[in-house]
Amino acid sequence: MIYKDMPASWRRTFLTLWLGCFITGLGFSMTMPFMALYIESFGHYSRTQINFYSGLAFSVTYFAQAVVSPYWGNLADRKGRKLMCLRASGVMTFTVFLTGLATNVYMIIFLRLLQGAFSGYINNSTAFMAGEAPKGHSGAIMSQMMTASVTGNLLGPMFGGAIAGIFGYRAPFMIFGVLMGIVFLMTLTTKEHITPIPAKEMKPMKEVFAGLKNRRLIFFMFATTLLVQMSLMSISPIISLLVKQLMHGVGNVSFVSGIVAAMPGFGTLLVASRLGNKMDEVGPLKILMLGLILATCLFVPMYFASSPVSLGGLRFALGMANAAMLPAVQTVLTTSVPHEAFGRIFSWNQSFQAAGGMFGPMIGSAVSSIFSYQSVFLATAIFVFIDFWIVFSVRKMA
């Protein structure tokens, strides 16, 4: 939804950032579901080695992101979120393209580490629009921004699977790099309303946190972000390998993996706008709890999935739960944090999200190596239920 009563410059900026997030999500999901298969093509690795390298390729990006995000957040509060979006899209143009030219697994891991240190386009675009959001519409705008990356994530695996099936696993990375160059040029045209803050006038983070009315709620939202992201990312490194196992290695594994990876996007798109508006009516914490309990109830039957069809159906329903989780956390932060601290608070939240993205694949790879690919879903259900209990215990703080 683009609000007709807003100035033309606001609508143009919203649309541009939405498209930027869409392209970023599209490119990401064109490549990531096939990372394990791409790594497998570099040599004759054992199942344990493939799980390890795939998990590491995912995790190093989030490790770097978790470490540097607070620095970028500090810079965002001083210079604005637009600069952060340009930084992320500009560097990713080169790192992703070069990943498609990699000659060994170690080069992939290094480039993924570098990508993580300079990434964050979607998070910074969300923070950008959070700062520009009209009062009373934060939930709707956060949900609308989420639909951008989700729509990209929805289409990406299918495009990536088709491209990889025809041209090989390198092609999706190269195309993603070119697309990020387009995003960089698009972002140059956006307009941000911000007054730069000199470094000497900025409050230290300790003082910012001390001035927050709901400090405990903010910290619990950080923990929620970590657990949600960890749960969502735990299956990512091995989703294509699981599909290959369910198909018994027969058929177009790349294409079917892409469809299964894309299914949550369909569910998210179906309900995101409605949940965003409902969030503004009943409050984000109620929507968040609904999403967490639904996700818990869906991860358990995924353990028993015996075909790509049943797995895809459950992941479709999971997408509906996804629409109720991270956007709700971002809405809580938007309504609980002073405008001058948006960049730093959102960057800390991004650090926790990145930490979840780092630990999730590591846990998923470890569990799948020791037990089975399906066992990852049971471990994930436990994490999500713990998160539900945390949110339930702090719901009265909002």
Image (cartoon, rainbow, N blue to C red):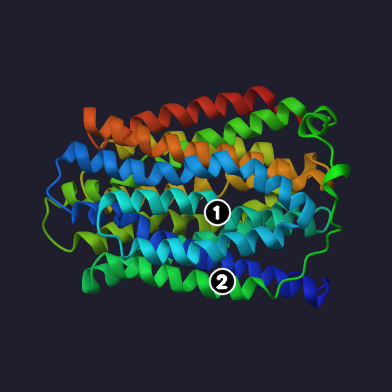
The amino acid beneath tag 2 is Val
The amino acid beneath tag 1 is Phe
Q: Residue at x 70, y 53 (%)?
A: 127
Q: Residue at x 38, y 58 (%)?
A: 262
CA neighbours of label 2 inside 10 A, class few (<14), some (14 to 19), many (20+): many
Res. 144 in view? no
Which residue extends farthest front? 200
**Is 379 on the left or on the right of 185, as rendered?**
left
Classify residue 154 by image quadrant: bottom left
Residue 118 badge: 1
Q: Residue at x 52, y 41 (%)?
A: 354
Viewer-proximal residue, 328 or 70? Answer: 70
**Is 89 on the left or on the right of 307, as rendered?**
right
Viewer-proximal residue, 72 or 352? Answer: 72
Residue 389: give x, y in percent of width and height: 57, 24
Give the structural element (helix, strand or loop) at label 1: helix
Closer to the eye: label 2 or 1: 1
Residue 183 badge: 2
Q: For the residues marked 2 and 1, what is the alpha-carbon distance in whole angstroms?
A: 15 Å
Residue 87: give x, y in percent of width and height: 61, 61
CA neighbours of label 1 inside 10 A, class few (<14), some (14 to 19), many (20+): many
Classify residue 344 by image quadrant: top right
Give the structural element (helix, strand or loop) at label 2: helix
**Is 93 on the left or on the right of 212, as rendered?**
left
Query: Which part of the image, by quadrant, shows the N terminus?
Result: bottom right
Vertical order, 243 against 289 (above or below): below
